[in-house]
Amino acid sequence: MKYFSRFLIYCGLLIFTLPAAAESGKGNGRIAGKILSVSGNPLHDAVVRIFREVEEGETLTIAKTDGRGMFRSPGLAPGVYHLQVLRHGYQPVKTGKFIVDPDRTTSFDIMLQEFLGFIYKEDDPRNWDPRTVMRSTSDRRMIFRNGKPGEVQIGEGSAEAFHRGGWMSIASSTTSENVLYPVPTQMSQTGVSSNFAFAEPLSRRSRMILSGQVDYGAGSFWRLRNTYNYRPDRDHDYRLSVGYGRMNVNYPGSRISSQLLADEPNVRKSGVQTLAFGLEGNSNFMDLVSVKYGFDYSRLHYGSSRSFYYPSIEIVVNAAAGWSIKTSMSSRRVGDSGSVVLPDGEVLYVSEPTLITMYGDEISMSRIAHSEISTEKEIAPDTTLELAFYQDRMQGPGLPLMVTTITPSEQQSQIVEMNEDQSRQRGVRVTIRQKLIENLDGSVSYVFGDSMGIGGVEEPVTVESLNNNLSSHLQQRNQHSITGRLAATLPMTRTKVLATLRWYSGNPLTPVDWFSDRMDIGTKSANFELRQPIPFPEFMGTAGRWEVTIDLRNLFNQGREVLPMKDGELVLNRNPRSMRFGLSLRFE
């Protein structure tokens, strides 16, 4: 494991050479794509019939979608084709004519509408006409729209590659107890936060995207990023971005400032200023290999200046039917609180890759390099198995720990930071995902990896003694973690409910496999998410959708550990029990 990151790069270079051996049938074309419901959920077991124009009515081949809604044809002779898509409970679809070119893959994202939704003709949140079942996606796939019911026509994908659209959310969070926790600059534990993004096309192949975050709670910050996006064809995508932000906790109403700020009135008057530059690219090779690469530069000023560099790469190889291999290296952690989704389904990350944690008149900055290699196999029509190895390397203390000492005479809180050796983590993850029944998905994930814990306290000591030497008792330990998830969609109301239950073998101070924890759980507990879409009528040519969001975090366990001492208690605080309520709007 010593050369784990280098091993990932070698594996990526090795699997990058696989497509040359996998590709056969030189001169033939292919058809590939994804079958989705109007709400954007992948549809498995949809039957895709492929017809060739010169042999009208004769089925050349029948493809079936996998658990991710993906389908792929074998090599096809160049010519004119059309598709027919069938799925139980959905409106059948017949496409218009299209051309399959030699040595090229024609890609689709086909939308199927439920019979119930077709009867009501409810407007789709992303401005799909009720008769429209297909449109361009983020990689300029072909567009199908404006056809008769049950039949769709082909439009020019390049002409409608980009559309004006936006997404914004506002949410309020609150905790159940008046207990101090470190303040990460990603989402308030108590306060109001908002994420937003707006895309404006400049031409058929380019657009500008303005995105950002605003937060006012235990910590106050805002950041803006302006991105130029250029897409010459469906297989290539490039982005250049620049961003600026400021953050502070020293303001009237800050819950943490009155308890932890220094007496100096001018401490952190200007707060933290961030300046960011980013360059990203994405290339697809005949739908066999996808390569994403990027470089981020962050400069942070807080009395003095610090700079961080973040190279990233992700290589995904579809080695065979039902098989995929991925290797990646990145510092940008994907989380619900730091991302937005544009109407075309594209995800934007509005948070900074630098991990910034503010507490009182001090600030912690860390760079986390996450490396991972994984393989995923479809072991049954509705079941996939994933095996992944990961490693996190820290430049900086990583996630700090809030410690509260309670004695008969006083109660005091402070932050304990870990050194870089203690922050390094590695492990293995095994995940099984299965579609249990229609509109109900489940998954179970087992992780065996490193985490931080407290050890070496063999006899009762005083609070002051342990508090002054707490960092010497922090030890890296192996932890077992099991996470179960159930995701359900109620067909009549299209309500989405996600329940997550996490268990650890011990009580770790730092989360195990933190980069896969998009919900920011961090400890063993039960968590719930609810998403309720609300139809939004068309107004001045703009259609969209409101969505109510309710998140319940750490209902039964907050990661708090109480250590009895001779003269009091030492309380370790990690994640509070919290509720988050908000609204989001997508429009186009």
Image (cartoon, helix red, strand yellow):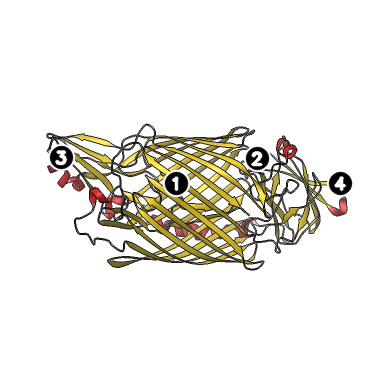
Sort mark 3 into few (<14), some (14-19) or many (20+) by Cα contacts within 10 Å: few
Q: CA distance from mark 4 to mark 2?
A: 25 Å
Seen in the image, is 27 located left or right of residue 474? right
Q: Secondary structure at mark 3?
A: loop
* Figure quadrant of residue 177: top left
Amino acid on which disc 1 is placed: Ser
Q: Secondary structure at mark 2?
A: loop
In this view, the mark in front (2 or 3): 3
Q: Please say if 208 is above or below 480.
A: below
Q: Nearer the viewer, residue 476 or 85?
A: 85
* Quadrant in which the C terminus appears: bottom right
Q: Which residue is mark 2?
A: 44
Whichever of callouts 3 and 1 sits on the residue coming sooner in the sequence is 3
Whichever of callouts 4 and 2 sits on the residue coming sooner in the sequence is 2
* Figure quadrant of residue 246: bottom left
Whichever of callouts 3 and 4 sits on the residue coming sooner in the sequence is 4
Q: Which residue is mark 4?
A: 57
Q: Nearer the viewer, residue 155 or 376?
A: 155
Q: Position of residue 214 (x, y in %)?
A: 43, 55
Amino acid on which disc 4 is placed: Gly
Amino acid on which disc 2 is placed: His
Q: Which residue is mark 3?
A: 410
Sort mark 1 into few (<14), some (14-19) or many (20+) by Cα contacts within 10 Å: few
Q: Position of residue 379 (x, y in %)?
A: 58, 39
Q: Position of residue 382 (x, y in %)?
A: 61, 36
Amino acid on which disc 3 is placed: Glu
Q: CA distance from mark 3 to mark 4?
A: 84 Å
